[in-house]
Structure formats: structure tokens, C-alpha cells
Image (cartoon, helix red, strand yellow):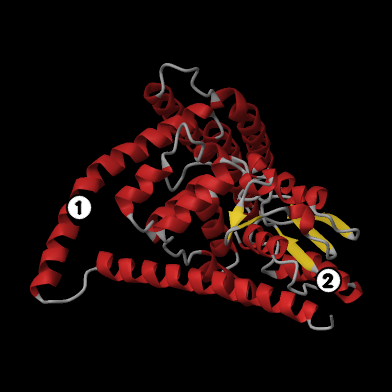
């Protein structure tokens, strides 16, 4: 959610000198956001009832949602860990990534309400109807160079919903690349060091 | 089991996989009898059949050797991948989304009264101890946010007025 919110911020604050902007696996067009988009549809998910009942959305529920979207993930992760138990490098990488990837935090209720309703259910960001801090968010107001990275196996933010940013920004210099990996493995782990970061740092060096 | 051949082990494994996937399919069908339940059978069967076939050939041709373990791992990977596709297929239907929504509604219907009772008790306890409750702290926070917004608006207006004055000075 960092990308849609930061994109909204720079779109509403042209006075802030942003040199360049990189969106890494951040969803923009929520009509193409996959399973979460389907499950959170207005007709199936009553966000007002959810927030009014729970107040804060507990971390366990957030975890359940993410686990449900790829139920076999824990099984294959455990199997691969068992298979590589004698590989110190693998275990070290696993411990670093796995702990971070499984530390879910609770959502403040009102943020969750706004996040689900405005972004998932009404796709206001992409449709140019979002208001942030009292200012209308128009992504076409983003004029700095933009680099968008989609992850081929991303089931949280599928490439199509990420790619949408290059179609709507007003920037003259904009580029989209699709790299191997999932929502997390795009940016963290050995694959990320090989595929993603050289591309991003190379682009940043030029912009 | 100790003297079972790899072929027997494989058959046992295959039977278990088939039974579990079928049980799951039945469960989905029972829970959603009205609107065309997803039929994962058609989807996973070719994938698994192919895996079983390959695995059966490997077992038939290869006796129990050190290579057995990598083959087993490969088979497990295929099996997990097949399940992942099956579940993804089923969970990507409107019907699953509806079922999920209904389950959440049931959870909220149970959880809501419990939460309200707990909140009421906490509120009373805090009142007895003369301590502010969460709702009171939240109300104060809301007032502060509103004050901040008013100050920001005032600052914007003052800035705009100063800019207008600056623009007039040269004249």
C-alpha cells in the first residue's frame, strides 16, 4: 500500500520537489488486483459492518487474509526449508525473510475502512476520484520520471494493476519492467539482488 | 510397511492424494449447492495424472536409490503446485467470495455482542478508577486533528494574503 499512498501524495503536492518516483509492485488500478479485489467487492464484504464491529482489524485477521490468498505457501516454504536445512546460506536467508514476511500488524479501523472502500471497492485512485488531505488526487499531475516494476508471480498486486501507473502519469520519462518474483521476493532475497536491484539502481543513476 | 516396494508406497500415496482432493471437492460442492460450484476435478486431474504417471515410471524403472529423495521432493513440489492451482481456481470464483463474505458475517455476528460487552465492562472499570477510556482518548485525538486542520487552513490563508500584499508592494 506504500505505492498508492505515496503516488497520491506526490500527485497532490506538486510543490514538493520529487526528483523521481519508483513504484515496486504497488497496485494502482484496483480493478485488476486479483483475489483480494474479488473478495472485497461491496456485495460480499461489508466494510462498515466489519470496522464498526471490530474497531481495529486484528493482526491475526490480516494474517488469515494473506494466508488464504495462497494457502499452499506455508507448506511449500516448510518443505523447501527442510530440503535445504544443511545449506547455511539458505537458512540464513530464510530466517531473515520469513520472520519479516510473517510479522503482520493490526490495521487502524478507519484506515482500513477508507483503504478498502476507496481503493478496492471504488477504485477511486485510478478513476481520479480520490481526495487526500482535502485535495483531489490526479495521477496525471505526477510529472517526475517514473519507474514501475511489476512482479510476474505477484498474486497480491498482479502486474496489470501495477503497470497501470505508467498509463496515467503525466511524466514524459516513464518506464515499466516486469521481473521474476512475487510481491515480497521481488524486493527481498537473493533473486531480488540479481534481478531487481541492479535495474532499479541503474535507472535511479540515470534519473 | 518396511518390506513394501516403492510401487506399493507410491500407490498408497496416490490413493491418499486422490481421496483428499475428492474430499475437498465434495466439501466445496456441499457448501455451495446452488450457483454452479467450481469443479476443480477437471482442472487438477490432468496435472496430477501427469505427475503420477511420471512418478510411476520413475519407480518402475528405478530401484530404491539415493536419487529417490530428489524424485520424492520433485513429486511433492508438483503436488503442492497442483493443489495451489486448484485452490486458486476455486477461490477466484464469485461463489467463493460470497461464501467468504457469509462466513465473515457469521463471525461478526458472534463477535460483535461479545466485544460490546467487554467494552462496556472496561469502560465501567476505567470510570470507577477515574481513568480515561479509549473512546474518550479518541475523542480528544479527533479534536486535536480538527484543530491542526483549522490551523493549516489559517496558515494557507495567511500565506495567500501575504503573497497578495508582496505582489502589491512594488506598485
- In the image, residue A185 lies at what x, y percent? 67, 62
Give the quadrant of residue A174. bottom right
- Left or right: B105 with respect to A146? left
Find disc 1 in the rendering and name its residue: B116
Q: Residue at x 67, y 57 (%)?
A: A26
In percent of width and height, residue A9 lies at 66, 64
> Which label number is shown at residue A198?
2
Most extreme residue toward the front is B171
Place of residue A80 in the rendered image (x, y in percent of width and height, measured from the top left) = 58, 59
Viewer-proximal residue among A179 and B81: A179
For the residue carrying disc 1, how many other residues have a C-alpha within 10 Å: few (<14), some (14-19), or many (20+)?
few
* Relative side of A204 to A154, left or right: right
The residue that appears at 54% across and 29% down in the rendered structure is: B93
To the question of a shared chain for discs 2 and 1, the answer is no
Residue drawn 51% across the image and 74% down it: B151
On screen, residue B25 above or below B145 = above
Depth check, front residue: A137 or B61: A137
Amino acid at each position: 500500500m506504500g505505492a498508492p499512498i505515496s503516488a497520491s501524495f506526490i500527485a497532490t503536492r506538486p510543490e514538493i520537489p520529487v526528483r523521481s518516483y519508483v513504484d515496486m509492485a504497488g497496485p494502482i488500478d484496483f480493478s485488476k488486483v486479483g483475489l483480494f479485489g474479488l473478495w472485497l467487492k461491496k456485495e460480499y464484504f461489508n466494510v462498515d459492518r466489519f470496522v464498526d464491529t471490530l474497531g481495529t482489524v486484528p493482526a491475526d485477521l490480516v494474517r488469515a487474509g494473506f494466508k488464504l490468498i495462497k494457502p499452499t505457501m506455508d507448506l511449500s516454504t516448510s518443505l523447501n526449508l527442510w530440503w535445504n536445512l544443511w545449506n547455511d546460506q539458505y537458512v540464513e536467508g530464510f530466517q531473515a525473510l520469513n520472520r519479516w514476511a510473517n510479522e503482520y500488524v493490526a490495521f487502524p479501523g478507519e484506515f482500513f475502512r477508507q483503504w478498502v472502500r476507496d481503493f478496492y471497492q471504488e477504485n477511486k485512485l485510478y478513476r481520479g476520484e480520490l481526495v487526500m488531505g482535502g485535495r483531489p488526487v490526479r495521477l496525471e499531475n505526477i510529472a517526475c520520471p517514473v519507474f514501475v516494476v511489476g512482479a510476474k508471480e505477484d498474486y497480491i498486486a498482479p502486474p496489470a494493476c501495477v503497470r497501470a501507473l505508467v498509463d496515467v502519469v503525466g511524466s514524459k520519462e516513464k518506464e515499466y519492467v516486469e521481473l521474476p518474483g512475487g510481491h515480497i521476493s521481488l524486493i527481498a532475497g537473493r533473486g531480488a539482488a540479481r534481478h531487481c536491484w541492479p535495474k532499479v539502481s541503474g535507472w535511479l543513476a540515470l534519473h | 510397511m518396511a518390506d513394501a516396494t516403492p510401487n506399493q508406497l507410491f500407490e498408497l500415496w496416490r490413493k491418499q492424494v486422490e481421496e483428499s482432493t475428492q474430499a475437498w471437492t465434495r466439501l466445496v460442492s456441499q457448501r455451495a449447492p446452488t450457483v454452479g460450484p467450481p469443479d476443480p476435478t477437471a482442472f487438477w486431474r490432468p496435472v496430477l495424472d501427469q505427475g503420477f504417471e511420471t512418478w510411476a515410471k520413475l519407480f518402475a524403472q528405478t530401484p530404491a536409490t539415493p536419487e529417490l529423495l530428489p524424485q520424492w521432493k520433485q513429486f511433492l513440489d508438483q503436488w503442492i503446485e497442483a493443489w495451489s492451482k486448484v485452490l486458486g481456481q476455486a477461490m477466484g470464483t464469485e461463489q467463493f467470495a460470497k461464501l467468504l463474505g457469509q462466513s465473515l458475517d457469521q463471525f461478526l455476528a458472534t463477535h460483535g455482542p461479545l466485544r460490546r460487552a467487554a467494552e462496556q465492562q472496561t469502560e465501567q472499570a476505567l470510570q470507577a478508577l477515574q481513568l480515561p477510556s479509549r473512546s474518550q482518548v479518541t475523542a480528544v485525538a479527533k479534536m486535536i486533528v480538527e484543530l491542526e486542520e483549522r490551523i493549516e487552513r489559517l496558515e494557507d490563508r495567511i500565506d495567500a494574503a501575504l503573497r497578495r500584499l508582496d505582489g502589491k508592494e512594488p506598485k
